[in-house]
Image (cartoon, rainbow, N blue to C red):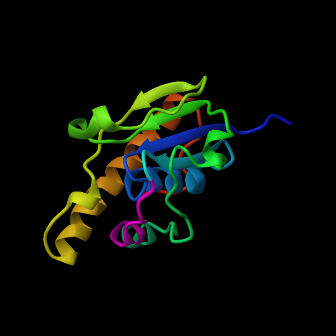
Amino acid sequence: MKSLETVLFVCVHNSARSQMAEGFVNARYGERLRAHSAGLEAGALNAVVVDAMREAGIDISGLRAKSVQDPDIRSREYDYVVTVCDEARAQACPVHPTRGERLHWSFPDPSSFAGTLGERLAATRNVRDAIACRIDEWMISLGSLRAQGSV
């Protein structure tokens, strides 16, 4: 039996974008690909992101923020490494040494959103939906079947 391909999503703090990407891949494409996520440094999981993902039917509340230095992250080889930092922070976005294909997808950082809780949640939904769409497009390009669910 062929083992699953793996993808590592990386950003600066592993508190929002990379966690959402991990959640979507594992929920929608877990039969094809196993996702992990990490950051340059481990932050704290963003509660607004957890709420936005729950609205999409994906519970990431049990995930923890991890650093690219985490032994569990470093011990793996990845088929794909996808950085999800925004363009302004792309230079600081961590690079994980692996043999896998490297991709960069730019998304705004929900941790930087200001305003009321409702305004931050609305902006986070936009990022969530953009990440979901990008993952669906990527999986189609890899020849995967259609998504198991959609936002």
Reply above or below: 129 against 114: above
Q: Residue at x 48, y 43 (%)?
A: 9
Horizontal arrangement in the rendering, residue 128 relative to residue 71 (left or right) = left
User: Looking at the rendering, which quadrant does residue 50 occupy?
Assistant: bottom left
Image quarter in which the C terminus is found: bottom left
For residue 30: magenta?
no
Between 131 and 88, the one nearer to me in the picture: 88
Horizontal arrangement in the rendering, residue 75 relative to residue 23 (left or right) = right
Image quarter in which the N terminus is found: top right
Please, which residue is most extreme toward the left here? 115
Which x, y percent locates residue 78? Answer: 62, 33
Q: Residue at x 51, y 66 (%)?
A: 60
In the image, the segment drawn in magenta is 42-50
Q: Residue at x 58, y 57 (%)?
A: 27
Q: Residue at x 65, y 47 (%)?
A: 71
Reply above or below: 151 against 71: below
Please, which residue is most extreme toward the right here? 1
Which x, y percent locates residue 48? Answer: 33, 71
Horizontal arrangement in the rendering, residue 36 relative to residue 72 (left or right) = left
For residue 43: magenta?
yes
User: Looking at the rendering, which quadrant does residue 85 occupy?
Assistant: top left
Horizontal arrangement in the rendering, residue 53 relative to residue 124 (left or right) = right
Reply above or below: 22 against 103: below
Which x, y percent locates residue 132? Answer: 41, 50
